[in-house]
Image (cartoon, helix red, strand yellow):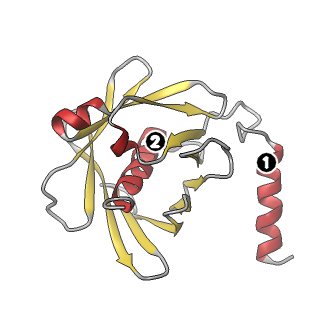
Amino acid sequence: MGFGRRQERREDRREDRGPGGHSGGGDHRYQMRQKIASIGDDFWIENGSGQKVYKINGKALRVRDTLIFEDAHGNELLKIQERKVRVKDSMEIEDAHGNRVAMVKKALITPVRERWSVDIPGASDMEVQGNILDHEYRIGHVAEVSKKWFRIADSYGIEIEPGQNDVLILAVAAVIDMMSHEGR
């Protein structure tokens, strides 16, 4: 069986599992909104079962050039702060105490595709590959981003492998979305 056929069967199995993506109710599939930085309002990230699990505080973006990820109870988990970039084409993700937990870097730009890498201190770098602008790509071996799971305009899905730091992967996807749509 060729790679294309195998990929097709994998996608069919995913669609058969329904909108949650897992028989356990979609705990690792999330719905994100495109261009969250341009919205400037609060936005809830829902899991595949439609439960509000993380909130992106967009109001802080207008006031402090900061995007804050909170849990469902309003506790700050991560923040993405726009600042004068120290390393060209990169953006940092910090925890609630201001410690860097990841740096997302635009590694290569060609007419055909963009390449990104994610540096997480104490872990192996992750390569981001696929079609970034169309929201059809993979973050390392830990997450898949796709528009095919949700039929809602201006949104896309992120399916994360179990055992990962889900909110960090969601923040990485948000950074990639912000950086890839700058000036567009």
User: What is the x, y in percent for residue 160?
Assistant: 57, 47
The answer to which of marks 1 and 2 sits earlier in the sequence is 1
Of badges 1 and 2, the one in the foreground is 1
Give the residue type that dot 1 points to: Glu
Q: Residue furthest toward the right?
A: 1
Give me the disc on residue 23. none
User: What is the x, y in percent for residue 31?
Assistant: 56, 39
Secondary structure beneath dot 1 equals helix
User: What is the x, y in percent for residue 140?
Assistant: 51, 62
Give the residue type that dot 2 points to: Asn
Asked whether disc 1 touches disc 2, contact meaning CB atoms under 8 Å apart, the reply is no
Task: Pick the quarter of the image with the C terminus.
Answer: bottom left
Crowdedness near tag 1: few (<14), some (14–19) or many (≥20) residues, C-alpha within 10 Å: some
User: What is the x, y in percent for residue 113?
Assistant: 48, 76
* Residue for point 18% across, 33% down: 63
* Residue for point 55% across, 31% down: 46
In the displayed structure image, the side of residue 118 where residue 2 appears, left or right? right
* Residue, disc 1: 15
Question: Image height check: is 68 above or below 162?
Answer: above
Crowdedness near tag 2: few (<14), some (14–19) or many (≥20) residues, C-alpha within 10 Å: few
* Residue, disc 2: 165
- The front one of 149 and 29 is 149
Q: Residue furthest toward the top?
A: 73
Question: Image height check: is 142 above or below 42?
Answer: below
In the displayed structure image, the side of residue 123 where residue 18 appears, left or right? right
Secondary structure beneath dot 2 equals loop
Task: Pick the quarter of the image with the N terminus.
Answer: bottom right
In the displayed structure image, the side of residue 99 where residue 17 appears, left or right? right
Q: Residue furthest toward the bottom?
A: 111
Question: Image height check: is 148 above or below 26?
Answer: below
Q: Give the Cα separation between the discs numbered 1 and 2.
A: 24 Å
